[in-house]
Image (tube, rainbow, N blue to C red):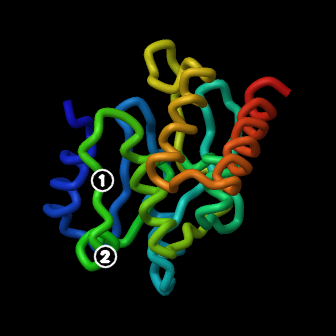
Amino acid sequence: ETGAGPSRNIGVLFAGNEYISFLDADDEFLEGRKEYYESILKDNVNKCWCSDYKTSSERIVKSSTKKNLAEYLSNTNIGLSTITVRKEMFINYGIWFPAVKTRQDTRWLIALLKAGFNIKSISSVTTLYRIHEAQISKSKLMMSLNVFILYLSEVGYSWSVVKYFIKYSWNALRKHFL
């Protein structure tokens, strides 16, 4: 099984617009999202944006003002369904979704950030993130272990990666339990 990565890449190739947004099957764009993004993107030179999102339990998750690799690894609070990116990120820079079963979005974001691109945050809730029993990220302990393994495989071992993972774990605990 290769996950959603190859399907997303085919969608990008056939997309007729300059901007690409992704929507997981269990998430929902909120009313006015398209118009809001269009007003912001019109004269903006940035290549990648994300927004805040709301969970199905009505909790608002804010993304930081600007995301670089260190900030993202410390707190992966960017949901794929909140991202809008210029199509050229794929075509001109070759940053495609990997053909792996899980966490294609995290691997893609890490590749994007490792290439030196920043993700600009839009301070507005544009997406509903549904929480349900069958989702992959339901088991927080198992997900944390998988994230650490992913960090090691995508970024390599260093004390900085360990530090980012500790911050990630603390932020996850704080977000879900405190």
Q: Is residue 30 visible?
A: no
Picture coordinates of residue 114, whole percent (x, y): 49, 67
Residue type at mark 2?
Tyr
Residue 119: image location, x then y, percent: 55, 67
In terms of secondary structure, where does tag 2 sit? Answer: loop
Provide residue 35's location: percent of width, then percent of height.
Answer: 46, 64
Q: Locate the N terminus by quadrant.
A: top left
Residue at (36% x, 44% y) in the render:
104
Residue at 52 percent of width and 46 percent of height: 152
The correct choice, above or below, for 22 with respect to 65 in the image is above
Res. 141 mark: none
**Residue count near mark 2 (Cα–Cα under 10 Å), binned few <14, some 14–19, many ≥20:** few
Front one among 35 and 74? 74
Residue at x-position 85% and y-position 27%? 178
Where 89 falls versus 168 (above or below)? below
Look at the image and tell me whether residue 7 can be seen: yes
- Which residue in the structure is indicated by mark 1? 97
Q: Horizontally, is 50 left or right of 77 in the view?
A: left
Q: Which residue is mark 2?
A: 93
**Between 82 and 148, the one nearer to me in the picture:** 148
Q: Residue furthest top?
A: 133
As drawn, is 97 to the left or to the right of 140?
left
- The percent position of residue 24, horizontal first and vertical second, equals 38, 38
